[in-house]
């Protein structure tokens, strides 16, 4: 396990009882959401959607760092559509994920190099590596 030399930021949230059917609020008040179980009629989001949003945003940031090192200009309409599945095997719950990356206008080899580099440096990718099935698709 890697020990941090310096903490850059700590996200803090408080989630009320009810878990997936509760609410979560960040310590700074910028995040204040209702939670609901996936597929339910509840009016809130769920942990899988939050994880997908965080990972896709982080992955775009990692591609930006890689693009700077490669001296490549990222297209302004780049996008990452993250899909995080919650499933079961036997009686155990697991996640799996797909990141569908759109880099319009870039040559395929350059786009692949960017996504490969981002997947090696993105903290979310590092956290999931070897723990869940992950597929990176260039679309």
Image (cartoon, rainbow, N blue to C red):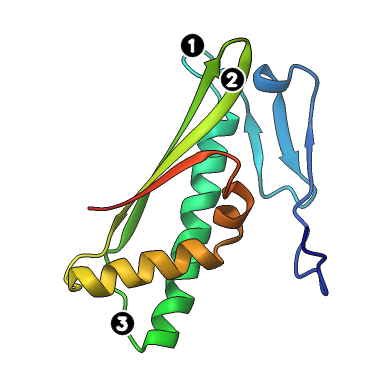
Residue position for label 3: 73
Residue denoted by label 2: 36
At 40% from the left and 65% from the top, the residue drawn is: 116
User: Going 55% across and 62% down the picture, which residue do you hit?
Assistant: 122
Q: Are marks 3 and 2 in contact (CB under 8 Å)?
A: no
Of pointers 3 and 2, the one earlier in the residue sequence: 2
The Cα–Cα distance between marks 2 and 1, rounded to whole angstroms, is 8 Å
User: Quick check: 47 left or right of 28?
Assistant: left
Task: Indicate left or right for 3 with 24 as reference.
Answer: right
Q: Position of residue 32 (x, y in %)?
A: 67, 38
Quadrant for residue 115, please give it. Answer: bottom left
Is 128 on the left or on the right of 77, as rendered? right
Q: Residue at x 31, y 82 (%)?
A: 73
Residue 76 appears anywhere in the view: no
Q: At numbered mark 2, what does the secondary structure look like: helix, strand or loop?
A: loop
Task: Look at discs 3 and 2 and give the one toward the viewer.
Answer: 3
Instruction: Name which quarter of the figure residue 103 lies in.
Output: bottom left
The alpha-carbon separation of the residues under discs 1 and 3 comes to 42 Å
Q: Earlier in the sequence, mark 2 or mark 1?
A: 2
Q: Badges 2 and 1: C-beta atoms under 8 Å apart?
A: yes
Q: How far apart are labels 3 and 2 at the CA level?
A: 39 Å
Nearer-N-terminus badge (1/3): 1
Quadrant occupied by the N terminus: bottom right
- Identified at 54% across, 32% down, the residue is 48
Q: Depth check: 90 or 105 in front?
A: 90
Most foreground residue, 38 or 45: 38
- Residue 79 against residue 42 in the figure, above or below: below
Mark 3 crowd level (few <14, some 14–19, many ≥20, 10 Å Cα): few
Residue 93: % across, % down: 61, 20
Say which residue label 1 marks: 41
- Neighbours of disc 1 within 10 Å: few (<14), some (14-19), many (20+): few
């Amino acid at each position: 396990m890697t020990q941090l030399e310096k903490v850059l930021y700590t996200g803090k949230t408080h989630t009320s009882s009810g878990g997936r059917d509760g609410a979560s609020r960040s310590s700074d008040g910028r995040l204040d959401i209702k939670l609901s179980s996936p597929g339910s009629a509840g009016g809130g989001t769920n942990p899988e959607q939050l994880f997908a949003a965080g990972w896709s945003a982080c992955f775009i940031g990692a591609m930006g760092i890689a693009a700077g090192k490669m001296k490549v200009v990222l297209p302004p309409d780049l996008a990452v559509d993250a899909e995080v599945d919650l499933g079961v095997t036997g009686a155990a719950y697991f996640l799996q994920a797909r990141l569908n990356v759109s880099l319009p206008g870039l040559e395929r080899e350059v786009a692949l190099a960017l996504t490969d580099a981002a997947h090696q440096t993105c903290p979310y990718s590092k956290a999931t590596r070897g723990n869940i099935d992950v597929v990176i698709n260039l679309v």
